[in-house]
Image: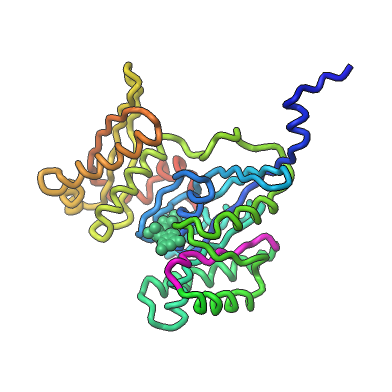
Amino acid sequence: MTNITETNVEEKRMKTRAGFTAIIGAPNAGKSTLVNALVGEKVTIVTHKVQTTRFQIRGIAMLGDVKNEQAQIILIDTPGIFKAKETDRLSKSMVHAAWTGADDADAIVHVVDAPALYRRLHADGSAQDRLSVEDTERVTAGLKLRNRGNSFLALNKIDEIERDKLLELIAHFQAMDVYAEVFLISALNFDGVKDLGAALSKAMPVSAYLYPPDQAADIPSRLMAAEITREKLFLRLHDELPYASAVETESWKVQKDGSIRIGQVIYVRRDSQKPIVLGKNGRTIKDIGAQSRHEMQNWLGRKVHLFLFVKVRDNWQNDRARYTETGLEFDV
Ligand SMILES: Nc1nc2c(ncn2[C@@H]2O[C@H](COP(=O)(O)OP(=O)(O)OP(=O)(O)O)[C@@H](O)[C@H]2O)c(=O)[nH]1
Ligand SMILES: [Mg+2]
C-alpha cells in the first residue's frame, strides 16, 4: 500500500543543495556587508574600521532557483586577511581563521574593494588603500596556490567607481586566471548580489539541509550581543579607540516579564582610554548603550535592559579563554 502524503511528493520534486561558502578578502572590502545582503538580514557587524570581523561567523542564506531547486548556503564571514606580525597573536589567529574557512568550503568568494584597488593601481591611494592592495594580492596568490576551481571574484563597491575603470580591473584579474567567474556588485545597494547568489547556489553540493531552513545565523546569542555593542562602540569612537578594545557579555537573564537583562563589559587596554569610552558625564557610553539596546531589541523581539561597564584589561589578546570562546585558535 502506498502512503505518500502531499508534502512527501513536494519534497521529492524539490532538489535541495547545501554547503559552505567562505567570504574572504582584505580588511574593509565589504565581506560582512555581503554576508548580510545574501542572508537578507543582519547577522554580522559592519563598520568602516579595518579588521572589524575577528572570527568566523556563519550566516545562512536560503536561495531559490527557477528549476525548483533550493540551496542553503552557509556563508562563512572571515576576518580580513592581512600580513600578521609574528608577535601579534590576535592578528595571527585571524589570518588562520580566514584561510581555514576557505580551505573547508565548497565555494570561495574573494571580495575586493574595487575603488580602493583602482586608486592604488594608479598610485594615488591612501596608506590604507595600499595595505588593502597588498592583502588583495596575497589572497589571489593564496587562491592560485590552492587552485580548486571554486573561487569567485566579487568586485565590490561599484556604486563608487566608473564603468571604464571597472573594465580595467576586470582585465587585471582575468589575466591572473584564478577565478571561475567575476561578479560586479554593490553589497551596500544589493546590486548584483542576486546573480552572485545564484552562482553560489549552483556550486553547492546536492544535500539535505544542514540547518533548520528558518535559521539565519549560527552564533551564540551572548556573542552576537557582544558584537552588536562592539559595532556601536567602533562606529562612535572609531579613531579614538584602538581596535584591540573588546566587549564581553557577562550576564544574560530572562526576567519574569519576558524582558532580558544583559550585562556587558567593554575592555580597554589602558586607563587613559576609559574616559574616552565614558565621555563627559557618561554621555558617550549612554549613547552607545542606547543604540546597542535598540538593535538587540529588534533582533530578539523583546525588551532588553542593558548594563555596560568599562574595565581596563591589558593583554587580553594573550588570554586563552577569549580565544576558545570565539573559536579562534590560540596556538597558531
Ligand atoms: N560604497 C559602498 N560601501 C560599501 C559597500 N560594501 C561595504 N561598504 C562599506 O565598507 C565598509 C566596510 O564594510 P565591512 O562589511 O565591515 O567590510 P569587511 O570586509 O567585513 O571588513 P573587516 O571585517 O574589517 O575585514 C563599511 O563602511 C561598509 O558600509 C558597497 O557596496 N559600497
Ligand atoms: Mg567584516
**Where is residue 296 drawn, in percent x and y?**
35, 36
Q: Is residue 329 visible?
A: no
**Where is residue 8 drawn, in percent x and y?**
76, 27
| Foreground of the two, 155 or 19 | 155
| Foreground of the two, 55 or 285 | 285
Q: Is residue 58 left or right of residue 131?
A: right
Residue 5: quadrant of the picture: top right
- Tell me the colour scheme of the image: rainbow
Residue 151 lies within the magenta run: yes
Instruction: Count the labels in the image.
Output: 0
113 to 314, vertically: above or below: below
| The N terminus lies in quadrant | top right
Task: State which region is magenta.
Answer: 149-161
Residue 139: quadrant of the picture: bottom right
| Foreground of the two, 140 or 114 | 114
**Where is residue 17 drawn, in percent x and y?**
70, 43
**Where is residue 240 drawn, in percent x and y?**
23, 58
Taking the spot 33% from the left edge, 33% from the top edge, the residue there is 250
Q: Is residue 160 left or right of residue 5?
A: left
Residue 306 lies within the magenta run: no
Taking the spot 56% from the left edge, 62% from the top edge, the residue there is 110
Taking the spot 74% from the left edge, 31% from the top edge, the residue there is 10
| Foreground of the two, 127 or 10 | 10
Residue lying at the far right in this picture: please name it.
1
